[in-house]
Amino acid sequence: ILTFLPSGEVSQEKIAMELNMSIRNLRRKLAQENTTFKSLLDAVRKDLALRYLNVPSISIIDITEKLCFENQSSFTRAFRRWTHCTPTQYRKTLKTSNTPT
């Protein structure tokens, strides 16, 4: 997923082909691990979003594009689902936690 996400070509079909297996076999193996492709993609996106938001020079629009969301609104909804706050709120908490007292 990490390999194909930057190009925007991340799909079950692409990953299965890269792993030399059928989509059905990929789904079966993921089910054995009690996960789904969507869950893995979501987890990778969340991890990368948190990392990118720690870099002030990367704009939220750039993060949206890097993570292959359709638009900033979609990214914000997903981020809120993951963290219960918006990307902007998260960045503000980073700034305040890094400010010397």
Image: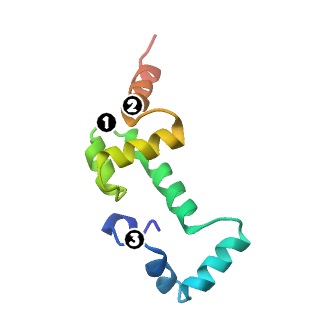
Give percent across and percent down for residue 43.
Answer: 54, 55
- Residues at badges 2 and 1 in contact (C-beta under 8 Å)? yes
Residue lying at 45% horizontally and 46% vertically, measured from the top left: 78
Picture quadrant where residue 94 is located: top left
According to the picture, the residue beneath numbered tag 1 turns out to be 56
Of pointers 3 and 2, the one earlier in the residue sequence = 3
Q: Is residue 35 above or below residue 16?
A: above
Q: Is residue 5 above or below residue 71?
A: below
According to the picture, the residue beneath numbered tag 2 turns out to be 91
Q: Is residue 25 above or below residue 97?
A: below
67 with respect to 16 (left or right): left
Identify which amino acid the numbered label 2 is placed on. Answer: Arg
Of pointers 1 and 3, the one earlier in the residue sequence = 3
Give percent across and percent down for residue 92.
Answer: 39, 25
Residue lying at 51% horizontally and 42% vertically, measured from the top left: 81
Q: Is residue 5 visible?
A: yes
Residue lying at 46% horizontally and 81% vertically, measured from the top left: 13
Q: How many marks?
A: 3
Distance between the alpha carbons at the discs numbered 3 and 2: 26 Å
Distance between the alpha carbons at the discs numbered 1 and 3: 24 Å
Does dot 3 land on a helix, a strand or a loop? loop
Give percent across and percent down for residue 84.
Answer: 52, 34
Residue lying at 67% horizontally and 78% vertically, measured from the top left: 29
Identify which amino acid the numbered label 3 is placed on. Answer: Phe
According to the picture, the residue beneath numbered tag 3 turns out to be 4
Identify which amino acid the numbered label 1 is placed on. Answer: Pro
Q: Is residue 58 visible?
A: no
Does dot 2 land on a helix, a strand or a loop? helix
